[in-house]
Amino acid sequence: MTQGTATTDAPAAAQAVPGAGRRASAAVRACLALCGLGALVLVALAAGKFPVPVAEVFAILASKLFGTAPGEATAQVVVLQVRLPRVAAALVVGAALSSAGATYQGLFRNPLVSPDILGVSAGAGLGAVLGITLALPVLAIQGLAFAGGLGAVAIVYAVGALVGRHDPVLTLVLAGVAVGAVLGSGISLLKVLADPYNQLPAITYWLLGSLSSVTLSDVLAILPAIGLGLLPLVLLRWRMNLMSLGEEEARALGIETRWLRPLLVAAATLVTAAAVSVTGVIGWIGLVVPHVARGLVGPDFRRLLPASALLGAGYLVAVDLAARTLAPIEVPLGILTALAGAPFFLWLLAAGKRGWS
């Protein structure tokens, strides 16, 4: 009897061990990724035109967190007032754009889709350009950019509802292209009307994306909107797995796609609009990073969302570090992300990965 019980329990134990091993391996990889991100943050705080030793960075951060003896005064200003806000913004915005991109790619079942597909960036750009042209304060410009991003997607959905719902995914994509073109023409018109000496350079720089003027207050201001948008993405991530199977398959499994798709699109749009409102348009992150994350951890959104957020945060920190150290002048982030993202996009096309697999 004892021998039979032992024989029966052996396969179960053999199956339990690999599962536990996989969980432990995933935990180890997550810890290593977090440690790597922490090291990258320290490098970003230390490196620049005014280099600060890593030990000095530790001392400065410890003085703020634990009340220890502060570091050298100039180094304190550089680390806490110049670099810390933009590093914090890079972490938040990179994670937000990558998570939104992963959501869009899953909902539209296409790895070549990004948060720009429904006109979020074009709407935010039009709002910001309008604010700059009207010489509004920075907070008002950010508010208009945020409202413009949300409004653009609302218009896309309204156009899609008017055109028809035979193929809702294709209808949304085509409506997004059309609305984005109209918004882009509005941006061009405002650029023509803007003051060429003061407003036009500011408009151009905003549309290329930058973290140079971001403050900690800006980062704190967008956290509630980003958190509100990420909450349904995290809570409904298992439903997103079913949505990525396709419209008919999801319905056959009991998923109400009529309300779930708009909810998830609205959540991802809220995240994107909040992020873009303070940094300007930073392209390619929502396209490239989720695809890399999918290649590393697979298509399961329980792992894909946190992996995309982690990789996106680190990627934007690294890009911002390069933007302010590689050249005598600071290079806009949109230029560097395009230089890195465009070859990756061409590789996807060459590999024939136009669809979802």
Image (cartoon, rainbow, N blue to C red):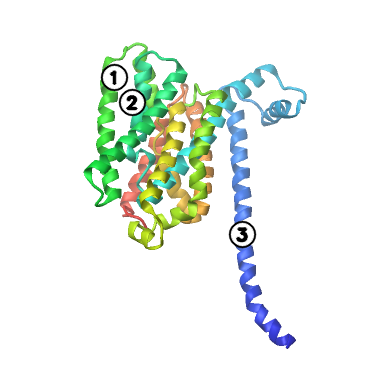
**Badge 2: how crowded within 10 Å, few (<14), some, or many (20+)?**
many
C-alpha distance separating marks 1 and 3 = 54 Å
Do the residues bearing badges 3 and 2 touch, measured as CB atoms within 8 Å? no
Task: Residue type at mark 3: give it.
Answer: Arg
In the image, is residue 70 above or below residue 301? above
Q: Is residue 266 above or below residue 136?
A: below
Q: Identify the secondary structure beneath mark 3.
A: helix
Q: Earlier in the sequence, mark 3 or mark 2?
A: 3
351 or 193, which lies in front?
A: 193
Q: Which amino acid is tagged 2?
A: Leu
Which label lies toward us, 3 or 2? 2
Residue at mark 2 = 126
Q: Are marks 1 and 2 in contact (CB under 8 Å)?
A: yes
What is the quadrant of residue 267 in the picture? top left
Q: Quick check: can you spot residue 281?
A: yes
Report which residue position mark 3 lands on. 23
Callout 2 secondary element: helix
Query: Looking at this rendering, what residue extends furthest in the bottom direction?
Result: 1
Q: CA distance from mark 3 to mark 2?
A: 46 Å
Disc with the residue nearer the chain's start (1 vs 2): 2
Give x and y (percent) for residue 192: 26, 17
Mark 1 secondary-structure assignment: helix
Q: On screen, 111 above or below 282? A: below
Q: Residue at x 38, y 45 (%)?
A: 262
Residue position for label 1? 190
Mark 1 belongs to which amino acid? Leu
Q: Position of residue 116 (x, y in %)?
A: 35, 38
Q: Quadrant of the C terminus?
A: bottom left
